Every structure is written in C-alpha cells, then in structure tokens.
Image (cartoon, grey):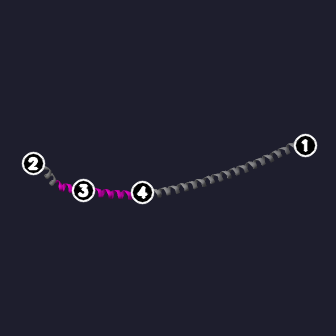
Amino acid sequence: TAELAHRSQTGVAEVRGLVEVVNSRVLQLGERLVQSEQAAFQHARANASADIREKLSNLEVKASESDAFLGVVQRALGAVQRGLAEVKGSIEMVLAERSAASPSSASAARAPADACA
C-alpha cells in the first residue's frame, strides 16, 4: 500500500506538473493573442488614418477646383451683365430716338389720313 500511495502521489505530482505546463501555455497563447489583436488594431487604425488623410486631400483638391470654377463662372456672369447693360443702353437709345421722331412721323402719318377724310 505504501508503494501504491507513492505511485499515486507521483501520478498526482505528474498531473499537477502537466496542468501547470498547460496553464503556462494557455497564458502564453493568451498574451500572444492580445499582442496580435493590438497589432491588428494598430494596423487597422493606421490604414484608417491613411484613408482619412487621402480623403481629406481629395476633398481639398475638389474644393480648390470648385473655387477655381466658381471664379470662372463669376467672371463670365460679370461679362454677361456688362453685355446686357450695353444691350439695354442700345435699346433705350433706339427707343429714345424713335420717341423723338415719333411726333413728326405721327403727324406725317396723320396728314394722308386727314386728306382722305
């Protein structure tokens, strides 16, 4: 029975040793997993930051292009306004000339009508 007790104690000691080895390996794997997750998170964060920087850069380019286009449109609208002002001035001048000539042409137009009556 003493030998059986000794073998039991030896077996229990071996099992405890194996459990400690397994526990140690599980802890190591857990640490590796945490490190791997942290590395993956940092990598994803770095990629996201790069994507954000690229998108911001693209937005800045588009905003600059929009500003340039807006400047062109504003200049074109200014030219159209000046052209319309010139056309308006010409129309007003023609209308003024016609209204100045209108009383004499109206009386001349009335004279043949008066002669017929």
The type of residue carrying mark 3 is Glu
Residue 113 screen position, x and y as percent: 12, 47
Specify which label sits upstream in the sequence, 3 or 4.
Answer: 4
The type of residue carrying mark 4 is Leu
Q: Could you give the CA–CA distance between mark 3 and mark 4, rounded to whole angstroms? A: 32 Å
Q: Main secondary structure of the magenta part?
A: helix
Q: Is residue 34 left or right of residue 5?
A: left
Q: Is residue 67 left or right of residue 90?
A: right
- Closer to the camera: disc 4 or disc 2? 2
Q: Could you give the CA–CA distance between mark 4 and mark 1, rounded to whole angstroms? A: 98 Å
Q: Is residue 25 left or right of residue 112?
A: right
Based on the displayed image, in which of its 4 quarters is residue 15 positioned? top right
Residue 114 vertical placement versus 86 (above, below): above
Query: Magenta stretch: residue 77 in it?
Result: yes
Element class at badge 3: helix
Question: What's the mark number on residue 3?
Answer: 1
Question: What's the mark number on residue 115?
Answer: 2
Q: Could you give the CA–CA distance between mark 3 and mark 2, rounded to whole angstroms? A: 34 Å
Element class at badge 4: helix
- Closer to the camera: disc 3 or disc 2? 2
Do the residues bearing badges 1 and 2 touch, measured as CB atoms within 8 Å?
no
Specify which label sits upstream in the sequence, 3 or 2.
Answer: 3
- Closer to the camera: disc 1 or disc 3? 3
Image point (23%, 56%), residue name: 94
- Closer to the camera: disc 1 or disc 2? 2
Based on the displayed image, in which of its 4 quarters is residue 82 positioned? bottom left
Q: In the depicted view, which residue is nearer to us: 9 or 38? A: 38
- Closer to the camera: disc 4 or disc 1? 4
Residue segment shown in magenta: 74-102
The type of residue carrying mark 2 is Ala
Question: What's the mark number on residue 70?
Answer: 4
Q: Residue tagged by mark 3?
A: 92
